[in-house]
């Protein structure tokens, strides 16, 4: 735990400074400022966006540092030198923006403020550090996550690495980030603390749920936070593993909650919508299953181009440039590791390089992922099973509260369609007839602000539904898409609840609100006791100062052109050491493109 805390302090310092510097730089651009004043104050400069969200600098820094780590991996191992360069960048930013940085650090209500609010953040920090220090190591982490991170630490990138171990072609931006902060260059173990750190940032964001008591009524983001808190409870004993699923889920929860907060605040600045859209795009580089998240960019694109000016067009193209910078290292890593643009997507076949993973193997791998997600292991028999065959059996295997939430998702989609149709009718009948027929409706107040908020809600809710369906028809393993399962129901049904709640009498809403708060308190107490009970089974005093290591397995070895490669004597996992490893004897399947492994690996016979 102590080791996790020390690394996290370093992570917070570097990501906070990098995020602050980049956000301050971007918000200083004239095209990203609020509109210039008119009337008596005409001629003055537009005001920069004021950041109202406490975790934004750190999250922005995580995106920036991850992009940096990916670029660094293209040129060599991500270790001591990469960290020294990062520190130099942070020192430079701290010097350039020293006055602004000091003012921001001591801003009232900040994470680092020394008051009761700051104490809450500190306690959550300690709790999540403890959870990250030990727990259940994800099966895939010992299968390939650890090896992927080890390759990045030592080599950065090797052309055709997926030919050695096909799962090493599952490129995720989470792995270069994990390698950057693994501290393996000190000569000890490779720490894996970044999945827990993403969970920490989400937990900090969820802390704002306490404002429900001060506010006296629920808002839509409260329901999203409740779903996120449930998720954090379920993965608390798993975030010790560097699995990309945890990175992605925490990131999607964060983006949606943040967006709903802006919707509630009626945020008018364009910059936060642009930044959140870029963060949603970044989520796709963590895991391809988040691809529909890019639909959120509809909101800022519409805002930028609806009332087109030279300023908004410039902001649009600068946003496109930032999106390109986020995506390009991920794409380059894909091409170099596998020879494919987006492995294992085989219909995007643009390259004929020596290290390319054979198309048949890539296609089979994609089919295996889909089959496994549907609950089967026999690809030959169930790989192309029709919907009527796999869906009922898949649903029957879902257990616990997830099955109930999936049913609620169906209900939520029905409500969403009804709200969408109602909104479209209102738009079509815009004018005096709308005001007469719909303006006094008990369902919607169709003022301009209300219409904009509903449109934003429909975009957010629609994005979650499309993410849910994309997950369902690709690889519907619950842990792959739990964030979509929970957020779809939370957002849509939460909206319906608030619509009904706002139309009830004050006497009724008071009791409903008290019941809701009481339920939340009891529920969190119950879940907290459950965590303590479960953790007692795995508690070990040594994890108070260090972190649980990857698994260790008995291995055998083979040679490929003089290089020793290890593989397990049983099963398919080897953990972090020994290195390099494969799932089986690959001596007859691969060869080096040049004199050694640095020149790349290719499949024999292709």
Image (tube, rainbow, N blue to C red):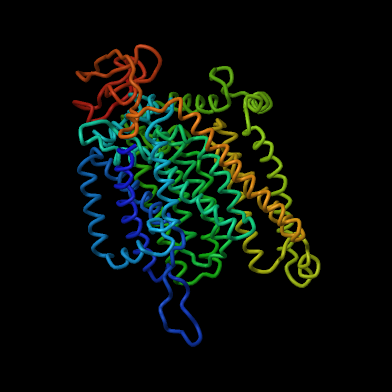
Tell me what residue is drawn at x 61 percent, y 54 percent: 220
- Residue 58 versus residue 466: which sits nearer the camera? 58
Using the image, determine if residue 436 lies above or below residue 249: below
Which of the 4 quarters of the picture holds residue 184? Answer: top left
Using the image, determine if residue 408 lies above or below residue 91: above
Which of the 4 quarters of the picture holds residue 381? Answer: top right
Looking at the picture, how far across and down is residue 163, in whole percent? 34, 25
Tell me what residue is drawn at x 62 percent, y 23 percent: 385
- Residue 314 versus residue 270: which sits nearer the camera? 270
Tell me what residue is drawn at x 76 percent, y 56 percent: 508
Q: What is the quadrant of the C terminus in the image? A: top left
Looking at the picture, how far across and down is residue 280, in whole percent? 48, 49
Looking at the picture, how far across and down is residue 366, in whole percent? 49, 28
Using the image, determine if residue 174 lies above or below residue 121: above
Looking at the rendered structure, the number of numbered marks drawn on it comes to: 0
- Residue 149 versus residue 405: which sits nearer the camera? 405
Outermost residue, bottom direction?
40
Q: 101 left or right of 207?
A: left
Q: 435 left or right of 329?
A: right
Looking at the picture, how far across and down is residue 537, in whole percent? 46, 25
- Residue 347 versus residue 582: which sits nearer the camera? 582
Outermost residue, right direction?
437
Q: What is the quadrant of the N terminus in the image? A: top left
């Amino acid at each position: 735990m102590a080791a996790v805390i020390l690394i996290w302090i370093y992570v917070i310092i570097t990501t906070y400074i990098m995020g602050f510097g980049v956000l301050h730089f971007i918000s200083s651009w004239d095209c990203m400022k609020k509109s210039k004043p008119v009337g008596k104050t005409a001629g003055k400069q537009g005001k920069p966006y004021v950041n109202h969200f406490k975790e934004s600098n750190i999250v922005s820094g995580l995106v920036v540092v991850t992009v940096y780590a990916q670029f660094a991996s293209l040129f060599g191992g991500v270790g001591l030198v990469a960290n020294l360069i990062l520190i130099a960048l942070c020192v430079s930013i701290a010097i350039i923006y020293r006055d602004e940085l000091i003012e921001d650090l001591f801003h009232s209500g900040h994470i680092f403020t020394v008051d009761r609010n700051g104490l809450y953040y500190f306690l959550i920090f300690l709790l999540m550090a403890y959870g990250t220090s030990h727990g259940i190591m994800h099966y895939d982490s010992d299968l390939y996550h650890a090896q992927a991170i080890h390759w990045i630490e030592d080599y950065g990138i090797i052309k055709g690495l997926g030919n050695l171990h096909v799962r090493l072609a599952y490129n995720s931006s989470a792995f270069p980030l994990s390698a950057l902060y693994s501290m393996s260059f000190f000569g000890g173990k490779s720490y894996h603390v970044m999945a827990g750190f993403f969970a920490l940032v989400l937990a900090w964001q969820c802390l704002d749920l306490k404002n429900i008591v001060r506010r006296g009524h629920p808002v839509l983001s409260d329901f999203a936070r409740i779903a996120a808190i449930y998720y954090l409870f379920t993965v608390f004993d798993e975030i010790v593993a560097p699995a990309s699923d945890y990175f992605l889920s925490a990131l999607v929860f964060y983006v949606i909650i943040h967006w709903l907060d802006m919707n509630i605040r009626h945020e008018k600045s364009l910059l936060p919508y642009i930044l959140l859209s870029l963060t949603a795009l970044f989520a796709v580089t963590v895991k391809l299953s988040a691809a529909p998240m890019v639909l959120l960019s509809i909101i800022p694109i519409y805002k930028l181009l609806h009332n087109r000016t030279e300023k908004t067009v410039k902001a649009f193209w600068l946003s496109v440039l930032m999106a390109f910078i986020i995506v390009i290292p991920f794409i380059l890593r894909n091409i170099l590791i596998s020879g494919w643009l987006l492995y294992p997507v085989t219909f995007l076949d643009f390259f004929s390089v020596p290290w390319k993973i054979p198309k048949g193997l890539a296609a089979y791998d994609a089919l295996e992922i889909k089959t496994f997600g549907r609950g089967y292991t026999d690809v030959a028999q169930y790989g192309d099973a029709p919907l009527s065959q796999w869906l009922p059996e898949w649903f029957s295997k879902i257990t616990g509260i997830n099955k109930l939430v999936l049913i609620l998702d169906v209900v939520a989609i029905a409500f969403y369609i009804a709200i969408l149709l109602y909104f479209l009718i209102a738009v079509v009948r815009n004018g005096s007839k709308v005001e007469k027929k719909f303006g006094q409706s008990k369902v919607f107040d169709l003022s301009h602000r209300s219409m904009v908020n509903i449109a934003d809600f429909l975009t957010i809710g629609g994005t979650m539904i499309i993410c849910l369906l994309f997950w369902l028809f690709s690889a519907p393993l619950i842990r792959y898409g739990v964030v979509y399962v929970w957020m779809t129901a939370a957002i849509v049904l939460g909206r319906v609840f608030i619509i009904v709640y706002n139309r009830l009498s004050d006497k009724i809403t008071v009791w409903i609100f008290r019941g809701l708060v009481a339920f939340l308190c009891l529920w969190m107490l119950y879940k907290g006791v459950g965590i303590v009970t479960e953790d007692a089974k795995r508690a070990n005093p040594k994890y108070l100062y260090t972190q649980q290591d990857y698994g260790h397995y008995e291995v055998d070895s083979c040679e490929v052109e003089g290089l020793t490669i290890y593989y397990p004597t049983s099963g398919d996992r080897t953990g972090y050491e020994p290195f390099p490893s494969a799932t089986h004897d690959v001596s007859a399947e691969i060869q080096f493109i040049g004199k050694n492994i640095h020149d790349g690996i290719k499949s024999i016979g292709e």
